[in-house]
Amino acid sequence: MRKWLVVMLVAASASAVVGQEAEVVKSEAVQAAEDAPEEGSGFIDVVRGGGSLGMFLWLGLAGLSLAAGALTVDSFLNIRASKIIPKTLVSLVREAIEDGSLRKAAQRCKDVPGPYSNILLAGFENFEDGFDTAQEAIGIAADMESEKMLQRVNYLNVVGNLAPMLGLLGTVQGMILAFATLGTTSGAAKNALLAINISQALYTTAAGLVIAVPALGFYFFFRNRAAKVILTMEGLVMEVMKGLKNGASKV
């Protein structure tokens, strides 16, 4: 009988000890779960986990995205042959030149300002000094108008080159934070922080590429369109100047 009592007391003591150890382990797990950040690596968590540098990077990427959109829309609206070389103006200038009236042709250009008008006016204003002088003035004016036109397109190239650089900087920051987490954090918190840090690296890279690829694509598209428009405009200007040279002008 005493043996059974001893066995029962030993078993009760062992179960009590095991229960206490289980409570300790459970309390430690609960405490670790409470101390660890919320699981997940959503966009808001990534932005918050990036710190002040991460916020700066995301603001920069957002600004570049808005700039790329605005420049693309502006180029679609303004880099067009119909806007730069109005057909009505071309017809009116030709009629004036055929009538031999340089003054009338110049007035037509002043009534419809634009790149084509500015180049023609440069030639008209210097025509009395000789055809070679007028050609030189036309060349200078054409270079200036071409530079103005291509400036808008070149900004798209700037955006396309800056965006992946900011994305790469975010990637480097995310990897630095990830390695720092490995060295300084343990337990359940490590996995959550690692997920946020790695997401920071990948999100910024993806955002930079998403901005850069369309921006560079539109840059080459509009640059080729502008070059085509410029060549067409220069050809029309030379046609007008040849008409002036071969005809008798009434000033």
Image: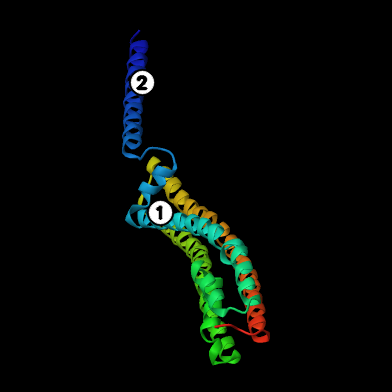
Residue situated in front as seen by the camera: 143 or 11: 143
Which secondary structure lies at badge 2? helix
Q: Quadrant of the N terminus?
A: top left
State the colouring used for the structure image.
rainbow
Q: Residue at x 47, y 56 (%)?
A: 70
Image-quadrant location for residue 33? top left
Judge whether 179 appears above or below 91 on screen: above
Q: Position of residue 100 (x, y in %)?
A: 62, 79
Residue situated in front as seen by the camera: 161 or 99: 99
Q: Are marks 1 and 2 in contact (CB under 8 Å)?
A: no
Q: Residue 228: give its label.
A: none
User: For the residue marked with disc 1, what is the amino acid?
Assistant: Trp
C-alpha span from label 1 to label 2? 56 Å
Q: Earlier in the sequence, mark 1 or mark 2?
A: 2
For the view shown, which residue lies furthest in the top direction?
Answer: 1
Query: In the rendered image, which residue does mark 1 sit on?
Result: 58
Q: Position of residue 131 (x, y in %)?
A: 60, 90
Q: Label 2: few (<14), some or many (≥20) within 10 Å?
A: few
Query: In the rendered image, which residue does mark 2 sit on?
Result: 15
User: For the residue marked with disc 2, what is the amino acid?
Assistant: Ser
Q: Residue at x 32, y 55 (%)?
A: 52
